[in-house]
Structures are given as C-alpha cells and as structure tokens.
C-alpha cells in the first residue's frame, strides 16, 4: 500500500526534475550593453523566452498607441492587411544605435512603399517619449519628423509575444519581423544590442519573398532582383546549377 509520505516524496522529486528541465531548456543569450559605458549584462543573466512569433504562421496580433506624422493615434497589425510589413523593435529612445536604424528605415521608406510594404518601429518607451524624441532635432540626437510610425509597448506585451523582451534589462533586443500581405510571419532577424541592422538586406528579403509569392520559384543565397532563381523540382533545378557551373568556368 502506498503511504502518504511516499506520495509526497514522489511529488518533490518530480518538481525538482521539472525545474531542472526548464532551466536546461532555456538558452543564455544577449550579453552586452546598449552603449559601451552602460551597465554590462552578462549573457548568463538572460534566458530565452517563449515566443508566439513562429515563421510560416500568423504573426501575433498587436495594437497600441503610436506616433504617426506627429500625432498620437491607435495602430494595430490588422491595419496593414493586404500589405507587407517590416515590424522592428529597438531597445530605447534617446540612445545611440537606435536613431541610426530608425532614420535609415525612415529615409528609405519610399523604396518599401513601391513594394507595397510599410515599416513600423516599436519600443517599450511611452508614446509621449516617442513624441519628445521626434520633436528633438537630428543634430541633437533626435529624430525630427518621421514618415514611419513609432509604436509604444509600455506594458511589454507585444515585445514578449514576439520573443524580444529582456526581463532583466527592461527593454528589447533588436528584433525585426517581415510579415506578408496575408499576415503570415515570413522572416525574423535578431541582433544583440551593440549592432544595428541593414536596410539593404531587409529590402532584399522583402523583394525575395514577394518574388517567390508570385512566381513559385525559390531564391538562392544572396539573390537580388533580376538574378536567376531555382525551380523547386528535382529535374528542373538542374537548369540553374548548369548555368551557374558554366559561369564559374568562364571566370
């Protein structure tokens, strides 16, 4: 007959084993600082968190207050239905790498719009802080007027849903998400804090995914518009590789 004490011992052992599994299942990451003189956060202090953002699945819904053309407005993911969306997180307003990324995307927004694509930036700062940053001249480290919205995630819910929030630091990693016209998440880029992202690469990825959407062919490494693609068929793919082989032999 199983005694009450035996049951308690079993439950205690199960609890320890479960806790151990959870700890081992989490990977340390994101060591670094927003800027060199800030408090350095050891990589072992951060744990990989669960995310609702899964490539090839519907992107997590979000809504909140954003600064759009200098005004405070409500914004939600469904507002971009029928368009591609580049949705990127940055750590904090009034910092260093962050304004260079925001301005880089902002200043090339027309290139994205020609591809039926919009760009939205997001951080855990309040919408009032966003507005103050936009009202600060660029020469003083501000943003000036922007053509792209900046979304406020003051509750951190959006950042957590997308798996970019650093609990210990109180802000996000540099996460970027490409969401297609059907609301499906197609690509994720995640940078550690000290290094900014590439607008050129983001444009290339949007162009590549849109090409595959339209033509059903797949894009090889480093593909750019106008270059050869691959027909995803065991026999037809040989056309691409034969052509590539001839090109290499010429050089």
Image (spheres, rainbow, N blue to C red):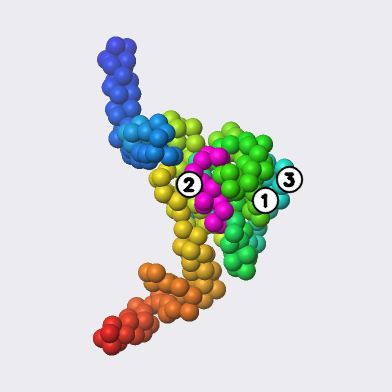
Left or right: residue 222 versus residue 200 is: left
Distance in Å between CA atoms under marks 3 and 2: 24 Å
Along the line of sight, which residue is nearer the eye, 213 or 247? 247
Q: In the rendered image, which residue does mark 2 sit on? A: 97
Indicate whether 24 appears above or below 229: above
Along the line of sight, which residue is nearer the eye, 113 or 28? 113
Q: In the rendered image, which residue does mark 1 sit on? A: 145
Q: Quadrant of residue 219?
A: bottom left
Indicate whether 42 appears above or below 109: above
Name the quadrant of the C terminus.
bottom left
Mark sitting earlier along the chain (1/2):
2
Q: Secondary structure at mark 3?
A: strand
Distance in Å between CA atoms under marks 1 and 2: 18 Å
Please rate how many residues cluster around mark 3, counting C-alpha atoms within 10 Å: few if below 14, some from 14 to 19, many from 20: few
At a point 64% along the width and 43% down the height, the residue shown is 136
Mark sitting earlier along the chain (3/2):
3
Instruction: Give how far across and how far down residue 81 sits, in percent.
Output: 65, 58
Look at the magenta stretch and give its main secondary structure.
helix
Q: Which residues are magenta?
A: 92-105
Query: Disc 3 or disc 2, which is closer to the eye?
Result: 2
Q: Which mark is drawn over residue 71?
A: 3
Left or right: residue 150 versus residue 202 is: right
**Is the Cβ of the residue at disc 1 closer than 8 Å to that at disc 2?**
no
Name the quadrant of the N terminus.
top left
């Amino acid at each position: 007959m199983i005694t009450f004490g035996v049951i308690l011992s079993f439950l205690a052992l199960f609890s320890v084993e479960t806790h151990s599994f959870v700890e081992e299942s989490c990977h340390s990451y994101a060591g670094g600082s927003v800027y060199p003189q800030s408090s350095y956060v050891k990589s072992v202090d951060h744990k990989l968190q669960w995310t609702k953002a899964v490539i090839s699945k519907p992107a997590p819904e979000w809504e909140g207050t954003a600064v759009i053309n200098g005004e405070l407005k409500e914004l939600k993911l469904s507002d971009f239905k029928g368009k591609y969306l580049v949705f990127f997180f940055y750590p904090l307003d009034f910092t260093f790498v962050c304004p260079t990324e925001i301005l880089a995307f902002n200043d090339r927004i027309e290139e994205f719009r020609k591809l039926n694509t919009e760009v939205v930036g997001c951080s855990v700062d309040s919408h009032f802080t966003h507005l103050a940053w936009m009202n600060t001249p660029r020469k003083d480290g501000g943003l000036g007027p922007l053509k792209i919205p900046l979304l406020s995630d003051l509750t951190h819910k959006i950042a957590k849903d997308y798996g970019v929030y650093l609990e210990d630091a109180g802000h996000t990693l540099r996460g970027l998400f490409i969401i297609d016209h059907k609301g499906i998440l197609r690509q994720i880029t995640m940078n550690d804090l000290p290094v900014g992202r590439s607008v050129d690469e983001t444009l290339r990825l949007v162009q590549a995914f849109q090409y595959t959407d339209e033509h059903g062919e797949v894009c090889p490494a480093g593909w750019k518009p106008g270059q050869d693609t691959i027909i995803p068929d065991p026999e037809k793919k040989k056309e691409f590789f034969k052509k590539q082989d001839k090109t290499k032999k010429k050089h």
